[in-house]
């Protein structure tokens, strides 16, 4: 196995000491089959124990290790060093406040996720004795793609709309709302409308499409938002011409 | 240990130069300005037409100026970019599912191009080409 020397420029920030973040460079001997997360783990284990970052599964499932790698929102466990130059710039995910080093503040995202009611709102609540809510494979297919989101928030880091207006509910939360709206067992679309179909919801999106470009699970949040725009528009006009419909 | 989250600032003017995908997005958005300007030229043409044969002849002559030709070429390029970029994302906004299978996006995009050809052919027929 060959070793390659790589310079990792990492944006460091210690809230107890620093007024603003600054880059610190580490030289790391890397194996060709390593990902950026391996190089960061090497720094933590061998060079600098004070470095803070999030990670868990190392297999693009947990969504914890998202970072800006050479300016691109990326899961660091999915960024192979063999695809990157010898000098790599690693920063915390863009558009989020920095808690410490590569750790960002996720509170606002969590609140937005909860605001779209990301759970089944059934027409009638069944008891366990009544059995499960049945669904055909075709009905499942309609929304399955949107269940694959791992909440890594790369989409928020890529979204210029969110960068300029952090009141935007954002790609992942709106894609998740769409996932439940498409679910044949769910009747919560109207209950989600106040958040989803608001100015800070789908209508803040101008379809840059960057969220879908960077999504590691190919959820396509940009597509979900455009589909929700169409459904919301149809709802609006149907309400207009149908007496008693809507709120 | 204390909490003191640091918020980074984002450029309000030069942000779109950061990534090629942002530049492509801005090009698509700016294309509507050229299309709007072209629509303005058409409206002026209609007004000249209603002003009589002399005004209409003057309008046609103005269209042949180098500046007008450059503008029309630029507007055509942006209109083509606008149209193709929007057509190419239609499968995202209007996915079609048949049974348990998703209709490949190429069919949805192709339908839009086919519609474009039909509408263009009708328009050319109406103007007597």
Image (cartoon, coloured by chain):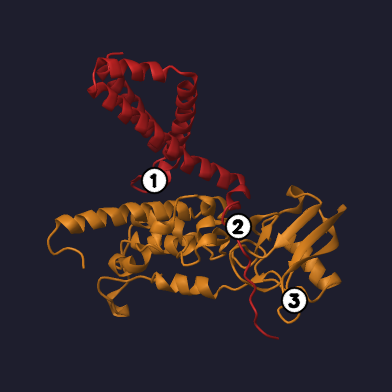
Chain colours: A orange, B red
Q: Are the residues under marks 1 and 2 on the same chain?
A: yes
Residue A126, x across and y down, in percent? 28, 76
Front position among marks 3 and 1: 3
Seen at 31% across and 30% down, the residue is: B43
Callout 2: SS: loop
Label 1: which residue? B101
SS under mark 3 = loop
Residue linked to disc 3: A18
Spatial CA span between label 3 and label 2: 23 Å
Q: CA distance from mark 3 to mark 1?
A: 54 Å
Q: Are marks 3 and 1 in contact (CB under 8 Å)?
A: no
Q: Residue at x 47, y 62 (%)?
A: A170
Callout in the foreground (3, 2): 2
Vertical arrangement, residue A2 with respect to residue A52, above or below: above
Left or right, residue B7 beside residue A115: right
Q: Residues within 10 Å of mark 1 (few under 14, many from 20)?
A: few
Residue B106 visible in image: no
Q: Are marks 3 and 2 in contact (CB under 8 Å)?
A: no
Which callout, 1 or 2, points at the residue further toward the start of the chain? 2
Q: Which mark is residue B31?
A: none
User: In the rendered structure, the residue with mark 2 lies on which chain?
Assistant: B
Residue A208 lies, with reference to residue B71, above or below; the image says below
Left or right: A22, with A98 as reference point: right
Same chain for marks 3 and 2? no
Q: Position of residue A51 (x, y in %)?
A: 76, 73
The label on residue B11 is: 2
In the depicted view, which residue is nearer to us: A96 or B62? B62
Judge by depth and name the residue closer to the eye, A14 or B127. B127
The quarter holding residue B104 reads top left
């Amino acid at each position: 196995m060959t070793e390659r020397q790589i310079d990792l420029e990492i944006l460091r920030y210690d809230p107890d000491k620093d007024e603003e973040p600054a880059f610190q460079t580490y030289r790391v001997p890397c194996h060709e089959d390593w990902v950026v997360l391996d190089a960061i783990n090497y720094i933590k284990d061998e060079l600098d124990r004070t470095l803070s970052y999030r990670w868990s599964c190392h297999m693009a499932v947990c969504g914890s290790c998202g970072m800006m790698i050479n300016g691109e929102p990326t899961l660091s466990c999915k960024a192979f060093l063999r695809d990157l130059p010898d000098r790599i710039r690693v920063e915390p995910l863009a558009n989020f406040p920095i808690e410490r080093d590569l750790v960002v503040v996720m509170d606002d995202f969590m609140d937005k996720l909860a605001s779209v009611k990301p759970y089944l709102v059934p027409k009638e609540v069944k008891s366990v004795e009544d059995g499960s809510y049945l669904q055909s494979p075709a009905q499942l297919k309609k929304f399955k793609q949107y269940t694959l989101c791992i909440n890594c928030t790369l989409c928020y880091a890529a979204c210029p709309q969110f960068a300029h207006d952090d009141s935007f509910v954002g790609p992942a939360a709106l894609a998740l709302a769409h996932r439940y709206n498409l679910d044949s067992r769910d009747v919560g679309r109207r209950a989600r409308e106040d958040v989803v179909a608001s100015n800070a919801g789908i209508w803040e999106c101008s379809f840059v499409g960057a969220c879908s470009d960077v999504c590691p699970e190919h959820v396509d949040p940009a597509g979900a938002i455009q589909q929700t725009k169409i459904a919301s528009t149809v709802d609006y006009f149907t309400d207009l011409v149908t007496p008693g419909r809507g709120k | 240990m204390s909490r003191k989250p640091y918020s980074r600032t984002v450029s309000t003017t030069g942000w779109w130069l950061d990534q090629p995908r942002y530049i492509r997005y801005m090009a698509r958005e700016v294309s509507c300005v050229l299309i709007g300007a072209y629509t303005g030229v058409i409206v002026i043409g209609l007004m000249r037409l209603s002003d009589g044969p002399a005004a209409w002849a003057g309008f046609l002559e103005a269209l042949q100026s180098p500046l007008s030709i450059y503008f029309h070429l630029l507007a055509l390029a942006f209109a083509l970019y606008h149209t193709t970029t929007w057509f190419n994302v239609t499968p995202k906004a209007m996915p079609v599912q048949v049974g348990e299978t998703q209709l490949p996006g190429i069919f949805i995009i192709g339908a839009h191009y086919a519609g474009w050809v039909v509408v263009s052919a009708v328009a050319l027929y109406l103007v007597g080409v």
